[in-house]
């Protein structure tokens, strides 16, 4: 590393086309597409390169520094290590290597000199030669490159300027230019046209796909309708929807006008105990409800059930898209910092600032709402309808979380991909507006899908062995959202997606409705490349990275052969006597109510419903629903599942695979997704030079100190707990575990509890951190928080340690947050462990 300043001069603004022509003539092999050791995509050209560059590796990559060559192309910033194997000419092209970053993912470029830092823009002029190059990415990565003493000054300066000018074009159309740079060549278009889709997942694009899902869930009372095949009924709904068999298409067409954007109640999923999950938008109160309309509306709302319907309101307690966007912006500012302005949060205020972002509060809120809906579905014999004003944001999130909690199939890789395809892509989540690739609609931007991935990670961190997919898969999906190359995220609904692929536009007339209009020849852009789906992982990552996406899990036992796929065999005995067909309840703020205006056609002094229907006075009484839920909660499981009853708890939660995975929601139990949010913190906190690469991050040091204090508390409490007989300690724990799924408060206990014999899982201590300049060996802090499940006592948080010191040392449990003392803080601040 240089100790003094290099020669001071202004950046020579080399035109990219001149640089491209110069490098293309000198080093390109057109047959193998290899340029200076970099295997380029078809049509990709190198704009600039710099030799003798070292890249700082993240903790996931092993830490330390890696020497190699840095490239800048039209599409990416690529780094090729010196000792990397020669690229295989016969293998399929991969968009991004292990050390590459797409230009569209870069948010800002910072040059670090001997005594100053500077944010580099296309019009910047550097008055110093950069010693380091720091790339801040939109996916919360911070990539740092160090120029060697022998790196030519012109290469260091020009590659910095080339990256700054290429990732941020001065003219609009940057997304299209990036797509053409990666996928626009003739070879690449031909390659993409011959790609085969993943045959193991359900794409939900045909009637056969939906029929397959209905058969899998044993939903016999539902059918697939194509009444919206030309998007005449609703422009945001897909062409295929699942509705009750009792409703004909001619009757169904009259119900679209009674809901916002025509998003009628639609079937999403069926619980094995017989409950159905629906999604819908808010009712149109200003629409007159005729007699036939009322009948059709109620048939759709109740579905195949005839007694109860619970409408779950998603507006009272849930955050708005604006709140989610503000919280995510604050989280980014906290985790990334600003090295160009030397702004960072002090270490003693880091946790309080994290709490002030409200991001983890929103994750906890979404998990709580999904847990409430999961418990309702487990009760059976009712329909749960998720209602949101537009039914395109939070309903996608909650319905997906419910299925992840309750359906083991959705916790596999293929099942999770199909879940996202069904509840987000095909159901009309506004990816294009919420992700805001073009940066032209800041008011609509909101990372709702990223909040969903965070909630799934919270479940995975507490029940890791119940998931086939890993956090590597969730991280890859998180990063893919910020790359505008996939058709899954570049449209707001199926109609917009079809318009792009088929080059069709539509016009609306009151007589003919929506009709396709053939565009002019001049409006068709033949240069638009075909966009692959995000699930084509072989196109994005290498085989080594794909191998880390899944892990082996215990196979889920098949459902026993029961009528209609219902685990509750004695249904009539569980029905409350005062519950007649037509009972509707509203679940809001954790309590049930029966507002008169819940269904517009049932409220008011002059309504069609009251004239044409007679209802029992007690048909909507709350005790009926409460008795139903209590009776279903106390029922014994069927004979096919007696060996794994709901009261049996294993190392990873309930042994019954059809019981919901209810998460712990206390402050210490909701952790920060460290592999995602904190992977750039080491660079942003000015630890980029090799001389300081061995020093731990301040947050890491804080977590390690908290862990040492916890071990001392465990040793102090070991003497008191050892004198108690094991049998007396195990019995209260079993009693607590059996009531875990019925406890909605997820209580925190201020005393240690023992673990039944045979249920403990010993975790290996991670190896110490390594770096380029090794120091004296020191114990490495644990890489996971203690809220991950281990043994029988994984259901609660114990603030005073564990029964024995040996057990505490083997588990390496810690909560690096202010809640580790004898008393919880008022706000239950979250931990930073992951």
Image: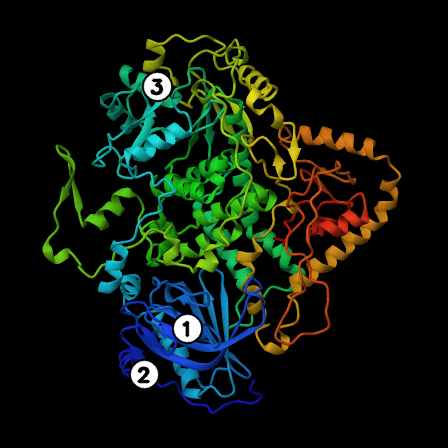
Residue at image point 67% right, 74% down: 774
Q: Where is residue 58 in the image (x, y as percent from the top left)?
A: 55, 66
Local secondary structure at mark 2: loop
The residue that label 2 is drawn on is: 14
Q: What is the CA distance from the residue labelled 1 to the residue labelled 3? A: 64 Å
Local secondary structure at mark 3: helix
**2 vs 1, front mark:** 1
The residue that label 1 is drawn on is: 86
Mark positioned earlier in the residue sequence (1 or 3): 1
User: Dot 1: few (<14), some (14–19), or many (≥20) neighbours within 10 Å?
Assistant: few
Q: What is the CA distance from the residue labelled 2 to the residue labelled 1? A: 30 Å
Kindly indicate whether the residue at mark 3 contacts the one at mark 1 (C-beta within 8 angstroms): no
User: Can you see residue 386?
Assistant: yes
Q: Is residue 501 above or below residue 101?
A: above
Q: Quadrant of residue 827?
A: top right
Residue at image point 63% right, 49% down: 830
Local secondary structure at mark 1: loop
Q: Left or right: 57 with respect to 17?
A: right
Q: In the image shown, does 115 or 308 lie closer to the viewer?
A: 308
Q: In this view, does 276 lie above or below 556?
A: above
Q: Position of residue 327 (x, y in %)?
A: 51, 52
Q: Where is residue 450 in the image (x, y as percent from the top left)?
A: 46, 50
The residue that label 3 is drawn on is: 299
């Amino acid at each position: 590393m240089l100790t003094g300043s290099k020669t001071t001069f202004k950046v020579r603004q080399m035109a990219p086309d001149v640089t491209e022509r110069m490098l293309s003539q000198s080093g390109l092999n057109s047959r193998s597409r290899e340029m200076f050791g970099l295997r380029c995509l078809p049509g990709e050209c190198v704009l600039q390169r710099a030799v003798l560059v070292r890249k700082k590796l993240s903790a996931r990559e092993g830490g330390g520094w890696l020497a190699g060559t840095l490239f800048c192309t039209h599409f990416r910033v690529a780094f090729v290590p010196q000792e990397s194997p020669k690229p295989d000419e016969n293998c399929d092209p991969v968009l991004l290597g292990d050390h590459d970053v797409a230009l569209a993912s870069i948010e800002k470029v910072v040059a670090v000199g001997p005594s100053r830092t500077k944010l580099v823009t296309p019009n910047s002029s550097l008055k110093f030669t950069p010693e380091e190059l720091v790339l801040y990415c939109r996916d919360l990565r911070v990539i740092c490159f160090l120029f060697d003493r022998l790196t030519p000054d012109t290469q260091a300066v020009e590659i910095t300027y080339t990256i700054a000018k290429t990732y941020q074009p001065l003219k609009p159309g940057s997304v299209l230019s990036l797509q053409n740079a990666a996928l626009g060549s003739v070879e690449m278009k031909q390659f993409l046209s011959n790609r085969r889709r993943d045959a193991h997942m359900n794409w939900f694009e045909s009637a056969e796909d939906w029929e397959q899902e209905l058969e899998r869930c044993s939903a016999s009372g539902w059918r697939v309708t194509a009444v919206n095949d030309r998007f005449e009924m609703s422009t945001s709904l897909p062409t295929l929807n699942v509705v009750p068999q009792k409703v004909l298409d001619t009757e169904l067409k009259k119900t679209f006008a009674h809901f916002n954007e025509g998003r009628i109640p639609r079937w999403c999923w069926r619980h094995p105990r017989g409950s159905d999950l629906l999604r819908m938008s808010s009712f149109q109160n200003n629409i007159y409800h005729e007699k036939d309309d009322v009948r059709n509306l109620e048939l759709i709302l109740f579905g195949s059930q005839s007694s109860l319907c619970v409408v779950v309101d998603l507006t009272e307690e849930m955050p708005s898209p604006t709140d989610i966007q503000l919280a995510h912006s604050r989280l980014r500012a906290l985790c990334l910092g600003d090295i160009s302005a030397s702004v960072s949060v002090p270490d003693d205020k880091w946790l309080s600032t994290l709490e002030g972002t409200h991001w983890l509060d929103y994750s906890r809120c979404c998990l709580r709402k999904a847990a409430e809906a999961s418990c309702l579905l487990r009760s059976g014999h009712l329909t749960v309808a998720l209602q949101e004003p537009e039914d395109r944001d939070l309903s996608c999130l909650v319905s997906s979380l419910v299925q992840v909690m309750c359906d083991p199939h959705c916790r596999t890789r293929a099942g999770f991909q199909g879940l996202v395809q069904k509840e987000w892509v095909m159901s009309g989540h506004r990816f294009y507006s919420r992700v805001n690739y073009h940066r032209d609609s800041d008011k609509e931007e909101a990372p709702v899908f990223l909040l969903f991935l965070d909630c799934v990670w919270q479940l995975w961190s507490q029940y890791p062995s119940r998931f086939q997919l890993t956090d590597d898969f969730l991280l890859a999906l998180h990063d893919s959202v910020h790359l505008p190359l996939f058709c899954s995220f570049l449209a707001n609904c199926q109609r917009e997606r079809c318009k792009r692929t088929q080059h069709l536009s539509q016009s609306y007339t009151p007589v003919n409705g929506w009709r396709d209009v053939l565009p002019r020849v001049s409006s068709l852009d033949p240069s638009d490349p075909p966009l692959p789906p995000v699930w084509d992982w072989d196109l994005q990552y290498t085989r080594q990275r794909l191998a880390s996406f899944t892990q082996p899990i215990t196979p889920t036992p098949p459902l026993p052969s029961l009528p209609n796929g219902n685990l509750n065999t004695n249904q009539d005995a569980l029905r409350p006597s005062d519950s007649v067909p037509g009972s509707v309840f509203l679940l809001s703020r954790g309590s049930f109510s029966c507002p008169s205006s819940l269904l517009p056609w049932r409220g008011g002094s002059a309504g069609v419903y009251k004239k044409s229907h007679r209802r029992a006075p007690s048909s909507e009484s709350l005790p009926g629903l409460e008795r139903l839920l209590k009776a279903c909660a106390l029922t014994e499981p069927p004979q096919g599942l007696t060996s794994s009853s709901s009261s049996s708890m294993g190392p990873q939660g309930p042994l019954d695979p059809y019981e919901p995975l209810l998460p712990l929601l206390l402050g210490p139990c909701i952790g920060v997704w460290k592999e995602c949010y904190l992977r750039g913190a080491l660079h942003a906190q000015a630890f980029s030079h090799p001389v300081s690469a061995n020093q731990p991050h301040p947050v890491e040091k804080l977590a390690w100190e908290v862990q040492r204090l916890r071990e001392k508390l465990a040793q102090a409490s070991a003497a008191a707990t050892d004198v108690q007989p094991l049998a007396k300690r195990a019995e209260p724990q079993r009693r607590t575990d059996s009531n875990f799924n019925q406890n909605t408060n997820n209580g925190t206990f201020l005393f240690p509890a023992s673990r039944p014999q045979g249920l403990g899982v010993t975790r290996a201590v991670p190896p110490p951190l390594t770096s380029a300049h090794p120091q004296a060996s020191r114990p490495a802090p644990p890489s996971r928080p203690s809220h991950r499940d281990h043994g029988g006592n994984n259901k609660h948080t114990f603030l005073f340690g564990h029964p024995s010191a040996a057990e505490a040392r083997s588990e390496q449990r810690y909560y690096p947050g202010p809640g580790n003392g004898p008393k919880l803080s008022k706000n239950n601040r979250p931990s930073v462990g992951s």
